Amino acid sequence: MLSALQALPPTTTSENLTINIPQILHSDRQTNTKILYDIPHTIDLSKLLLCNDERVLDQPIAESIGRALGIWTRSFHQWAAHSNQAQLRVDVGLNMPMRKLKLKITYQAFMGVLENFPELLEGNRETLEQVRIEAVENFEREEGGEENSDDWGLIHGDLWTGK
C-alpha cells in the first residue's frame, strides 16, 4: 500500500502544514524491511498529540492540524475511488488477513466498546447494530473480481500512538 500511495501528492494547507505519506527508499519483501525517507526538522503526529506542553499544541494549531488531516483524508478517498486505482482496490480486497483484522477490531468490537458509553447508544442501538450486521455481510461477500472493484473502497488505517 505504501508503494501505491507514492502517487498520492502531499497535502499542504494555507497554514503551511503538510500531510505526506512516508517515501519508500528501499523495500525488501523477503526480509520485510522498508527504508523510509526521514524528513528533518519535523514532528510526527503521534509525538505531537502525546506532548504535554500546551504551548506546542494550542487551540489554533490543533484546529489547523484537524483541517489538514480532513483535507488529506478527502484527497485519499478521491484518489482511491479513481478508476486508476481499480486494480489496487481488487488487490486490497484479496488481502484476507487484513480484511479479517479490520472486521474484528472495527465492526465486531464497536458495539462492545460503546456499551461503556450508554449515552451514545441511547436511541442509536438499532441503527448501530444494523451497521454491524451489514459490515459482516459485506465481509462475507466474495471479493476479488474486477467487476466488483467499483463497489469497494479503500480505507485508511487509524492513528495509533502505541499508548
Image (cartoon, rainbow, N blue to C red):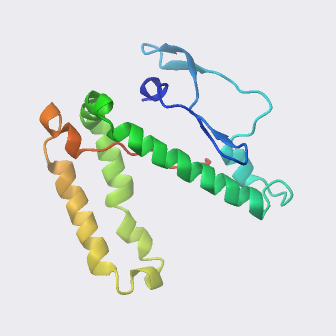
In this view, 128 is above or below 70: below
Estimate the x, y position of residue 108 in percent, counting from the top left. Answer: 31, 60
Residue 57 place in picture, x, y as percent: 78, 56
Q: Residue furthest front?
A: 14
Image vertical order of residue 61 relative to residue 4, above or below = below
Q: In the picture, residue 111 is in which quadrant?
A: bottom left
- Report the number of discs: 0
Front position in the image: 73 or 42:
73
Does the image show residue 9? Answer: yes
Considering only vertical position in the picture, is 150 above or below 130? Answer: above
Query: In screen coordinates, is 61 left or right of 125?
Result: right
Residue at point 77%, 27% (across, down):
40
Q: Is residue 57 left or right of residue 46?
A: right
The quadrant holding residue 19 is: top right
Is 59 left or right of 137, judged from the image as shown?
right
Question: Which quadrant of the figure contains the N terminus?
Answer: top left
The location of residue 36, given as percent across then percent down, is: 60, 22
Residue in the picture at 62% in, 56% down: 66
Q: Residue, x 16% and y 32% (percent of image)?
A: 146
Task: List x then y, in percent, for residue 69.
Answer: 58, 50
Q: Residue at x 33, y 59 (%)?
A: 107
The answer to whether residue 88 is visible is no
* Viewer-closest of 50 and 15: 15
Would residue 66 be found to the left or right of residue 16 on screen?
left
